[in-house]
Image (spheres, helix red, strand yellow):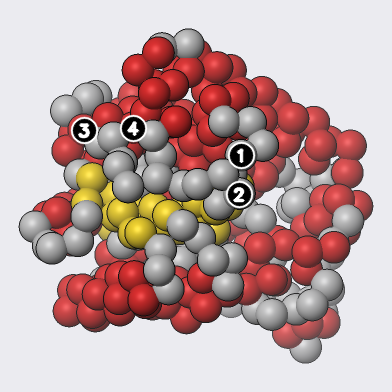
Amino acid sequence: MTAPAYDPRAGVYAAGRHFGLAEPEHLPRPDPQELELLVRFEHPAKLLAVAELPGAAGLSDGCLSEAYATTAATLEQVRARLARRVRDAAAELVADGTVQQAVRALPVPTGGCLVALGDSITDDLLSWAEVLRECVGLVRPGEISVVNAGVSGDTTADVLSRLYGVLALRPDLVIAMLGTNDCQRHGPGEERLVADGESDRNVAAISDWVRRSGARLVWLTPPPVLAPALAAAMGDRPLRVRDGDVSALAQRLAGSEEEVIDVAAYLRAGSLPELLLADGVHLDLAGHLVVVAALLRHRLRP
C-alpha cells in the first residue's frame, strides 16, 4: 500500500531527514485562502519559543516564510491585510464612547501588562486579543502592553506547563480562554484529549498560580462548536469535537467561583454559522467582536 503524499495540512507530517525519512518529492503549496488561514493560526516562532529554543524570537521572516511554503514578501502582505482588518474593526468599536470608557477602565496601570492566554482562538491574528490590543492602543496609547500569549493547539495541560513563562511578564491582568482542545476526540474510539476531571483540575491550578503571582484572572468560556461542520472539514482524519463536551466545560467554568465572562452564551444568542469559520470551531472576526463586546460590557474594575 502506498503511503499518502506528504501534506502536514492533512495531518500527514512524517517525512524528511528530521524523521530519518526521505525528503518528499514535492512540497504542498497553499493557495491564497489556505495561506491566509495558516498565517492567521499557525505561528512557528511561538511554537519554537515554547519549546525553549533560544533563537525563536529572532527568526527572520525569510526563515518563517519557508515554513508556510511562501515568500517573505507574500507573508508580509498577508499579515498586513489581516492587521488592517483588526485596525478597522477596533477603530469602529472605539468610535463608541461607552467602549472608550470601558477600555480606560481596564484594571491595568500605566506601564502595566495585560496578557491574553489561550489556544488558536486567541492566537488567531484576527482574534479578540488582537482587537483588544488595538482598542487599547487607540484609547490608551503607549500606556500598557497587551500580550497575545495564545498558542495554537494548546490544552489546559499545555498552558499549565508553560505558565511560568507567561507569568514571568508580571502581568497585572490575565484574560484566559481555554478548553476547546481539551475536548478534542481522536482515533477510532474517539478518546478525549483531556478528560473532564483533568480539565477542571488544570483550570484550578492555572487560577491558583495566576492569583499567587499577584495578577487578576478573568476566564472566558470557550465558544460553541458546530460539530458537523468540523467533521466535514476533517474528512477522513479521526479528529472530532462534540459541542456537548465544550458546552459542559463552559457551564462548569461559568458555575465555578472564578471570575468568568460567559462569552459562549453571547455567541449562542447570535447566528453561529455567521460567527464561526467553515471548520465550525474557530471564530471569524465577527465572532471575535462579540467576545470583545462581552468582555468590555463586563466593565472590569480594580
Residue occupied by mark 1: 143
- Disc number for residue 266: 3
* Quadrant position of residue 301: top left
Mark 4–mark 1 Cα distance, whole angstroms, equals: 18 Å
Above or below — where is 30 with respect to 271? Answer: below
Residue occupied by mark 4: 296
Disc 4 residue crowd, few under 14, some 14–19, many 20+, Cα 10 Å: some
- x 42%, y 54%: residue: 173
Disc 3 residue crowd, few under 14, some 14–19, many 20+, Cα 10 Å: some
Question: Residue 256: horizontal and vertical position, in percent?
Answer: 12, 62
Is residue 5 visible from the viewing direction of this image? no
First-in-chain label (3 vs 4): 3
Above or below — where is 14 with respect to 145? Answer: below
Mark 1–mark 3 Cα distance, whole angstroms, equals: 30 Å
Q: Circle 4 — which element? A: helix
Q: Amino acid at mark 1?
A: Glu
Q: Classify residue 131 as left or right of residue 294.
A: right
* Quadrant position of residue 17: bottom right
Residue 206 vs residue 42, the one in the foreground: 206
Mark 3–mark 2 Cα distance, whole angstroms, equals: 32 Å
Instruction: Choose mark 4 or mark 2, whichever is in front.
Output: 2
* Quadrant position of residue 136: top right
Q: Amino acid at mark 4?
A: Leu
Question: Residue 2: horizontal and vertical position, in percent?
Answer: 63, 73
Q: Amino acid at mark 2?
A: Gly
Residue occupied by mark 2: 111
Residues at badges 4 and 1 in contact (C-beta under 8 Å)?
Answer: no
Q: Circle 1 — which element? A: loop
Instruction: Choose mark 4 or mark 1, whichever is in front.
Output: 1
Residues at badges 1 and 3 in contact (C-beta under 8 Å)?
Answer: no
Mark 3–mark 4 Cα distance, whole angstroms, equals: 13 Å
Q: Classify residue 23 as left or right of residue 211.
A: right
